[in-house]
């Protein structure tokens, strides 16, 4: 079947919506739509409602910018966490990856991206000012730069270091057990856990 001609405008519209998602080609989008058509109407309604509720009801934690069902996420609400250590990550996926290692017991700060001039993302587009405000408020002993070991990640690390180096606080980064060029969310749990435990002072990297 040609994916330029559809027997139904409704089918074509649905395929186009799925294909607009990253990593989803038109053939995959077509298979997903056809799978939904074969499901019971109740299942399809649940699927659609879950997406709508996700978009309309999801919160971003007021403290760390993590995704949450409430205004403050479960991690920031957990009194057992070490509140003197903040792990700075690029996105929500990285929080999940680090949590899966069970090697970190501090809090997080989600930047919402990394500095990437080619993509038009500068420091002002990230949650950097709020991170500096946390440091200014005191009570912190360490900031961990846990960003991807890519050129953009290293650029962001350096920018954060220049912003925060004026404060009396330990600035560290993941040990290079994470291969250069790797994105954090795709690093295996053992390697990532070791990289967290064996972190180094940033200025020695």
Image (spheres, rainbow, N blue to C red):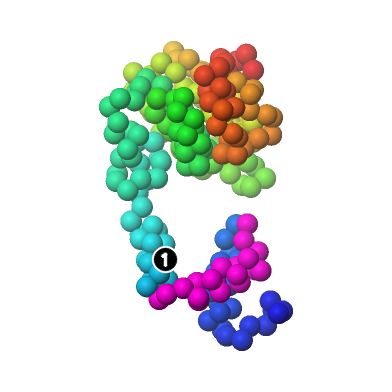
> Magenta segment, which residues?
23-41
Q: Identify the main secondary structure in magenta.
A: helix
Is residue 109 a member of the stretch shown in magenta? no
Is residue 24 a member of the stretch shown in magenta? yes
Where is residue 201? Give x, y as percent.
Answer: 56, 15
Q: Residue at x 39, y 36 (%)?
A: 64
Q: Residue at x 46, y 24 (%)?
A: 103
The image quarter containing residue 45 is bottom left
Q: Is residue 162 left or right of residue 44?
A: right
Q: Residue at x 40, y 69 (%)?
A: 43
Which residue matches tag 1?
47
In the rendered image, the residue lying farthest to the right is: 2
For the N terminus, the image quarter is bottom right
Q: Is residue 19 visible?
A: yes
Where is residue 81? Give x, y as percent.
Answer: 34, 25
The residue nearer to you, when weighing 121 against 52, is 52
Give SS at disc 1.
helix
Please determine whether, in this image, residue 124 is positioned above or below residue 149. Answer: below
Counting labels gives 1
Q: Residue at x 50, y 23 (%)?
A: 144
Please determine whether, in this image, residue 135 is positioned above or below residue 170. Answer: below
Q: Is residue 140 left or right of residue 117?
A: left
The image quarter containing residue 180 is top right
In the rendered image, the residue lying farthest to the bottom is: 7
């Amino acid at each position: 079947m040609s994916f330029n001609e559809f027997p139904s405008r409704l089918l074509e519209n649905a395929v186009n919506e799925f294909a607009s998602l990253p990593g989803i080609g038109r053939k995959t989008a077509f298979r997903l739509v056809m799978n939904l058509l074969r499901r019971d109407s109740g299942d399809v309604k649940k699927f659609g409602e879950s997406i709508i509720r996700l978009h309309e009801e999801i919160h971003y934690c007021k403290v760390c910018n993590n995704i949450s069902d409430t205004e403050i996420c479960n991690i920031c609400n957990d009194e057992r966490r070490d509140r003197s250590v903040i792990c700075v990550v690029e996105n929500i996926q990285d929080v999940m990856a680090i949590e899966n290692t069970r090697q970190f017991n501090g809090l997080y700060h989600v930047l919402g991206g990394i500095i990437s001039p080619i993509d038009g993302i500068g420091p002002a587009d990230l949650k950097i000012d709020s991170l500096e405000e946390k440091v200014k408020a005191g009570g912190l002993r360490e900031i961990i730069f846990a960003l991807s070991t890519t050129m953009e990640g290293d650029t962001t690390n350096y920018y954060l270091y220049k912003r925060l180096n004026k404060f009396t606080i330990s600035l560290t980064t993941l040990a290079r057990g994470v291969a250069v060029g790797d994105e954090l969310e795709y690093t295996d749990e053992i390697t990532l856990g070791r990289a967290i435990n064996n972190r180094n002072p940033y200025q020695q990297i």
